Amino acid sequence: MSNLVAVVTGAGHGIGKGIAQLLSETGYIVHSVDLPEVDLSNSAQANAFFAKIGPVDILVNNAGGVAGQVHHPLEEITDEQWQAIFNANVQTTFNSTRAVVSGMKAKKWGRIVNISSGAGRSVSLTGIQAYASSKAAQIAFTRQMAYELGPHGITVNCIAPGFILSNPTTIKQWESYGDEGQAKIISGIATRRLGKPHDIANAVRFFASEDSSWITGQCLSVDGGHSLF
């Protein structure tokens, strides 16, 4: 394990930071990357970053988000707004995965974990159309890559987090709901609490381990039971 190299994208704060910390504590050699250091939606920057690291054993595609946007009616959405969110979520995942698969194939072993969202399986509380759509695309990409890469000893799985209070954006979103809205969200979670970055990191650690070697193409909801409702 101490020789296995992991890369966690979008690791500057929140969920990504929590994942990077737990994988490091577990014993992996962890490389963290985030904006503005590297824009992984840019293929040239992504390729240059991964070329410096060399072969990667574990890739966690956590980079993404809403690109600073809020909900607007669909007819008001510009091409640029739509594409910005797809770049943040889908293009980063594609570029990073493409950059590491050759090395994983050479070793006949690899773990890829994509961080989607409950919004990709249902609807987004933000109401941002491109966010829900791009997160669903990550789940589809997970399945397709699991099918393609499985014969090479590479597993590809996905995690769909529930509401995680982990960064300024989610804190602002949470505060905007007010007491009544917050109580409604909590009542729709079986465990009656919001998630923490560590909850997601624990699931990533499992998918990165040998214990998950016969699990691939799956999307695990880590949401305190919210998806039950």
Image (tube, rainbow, N blue to C red):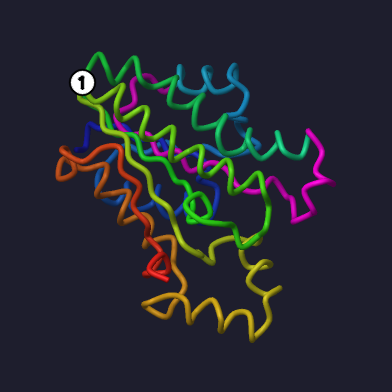
Amino acid at pointer 1: Pro
Please tell me which residue is depicted at 50% across the width and 27% down the height of the picture: 94
Which of the two residues, 167 or 146, is positioned nearer the viewer here?
Answer: 146
Question: Quadrant where the N terminus lies?
Answer: top left
Q: Please tell me in which quadrant of the rendered image residue 90 appears.
A: top right
Q: What type of secondary structure mainly makes up the magenta span?
A: loop
Question: Which residue is depicted at the point 54% across and 67% down?
Answer: 165
Q: How many marks?
A: 1
Q: Which residue is mark 1?
A: 151
72 within the magenta span:
yes
Q: Foreground: 182 or 36?
A: 182
The relative height of residue 141 versus residue 177 in the rendered view (above or below) is above
Q: Residue at x 35, y 47 (%)?
A: 219
Instruction: Pinpoint residue 174: horizontal percent, then vertical percent.
Output: 63, 71
* In this picture, residue 187 sits left or right of residue 152: right
Side of 212 where 225 appears, left or right: right
Which image quarter holds the C terminus? bottom left
Q: In front here: 188 or 172? A: 188
Is 96 covered by the magenta stretch? no
Q: Position of residue 89 (x, y in %)?
A: 57, 39
Q: Which secondary structure lies at badge 1? A: helix
* Residue 85: image location, x then y, percent: 66, 40
* First to last magenta residue range: 53-79
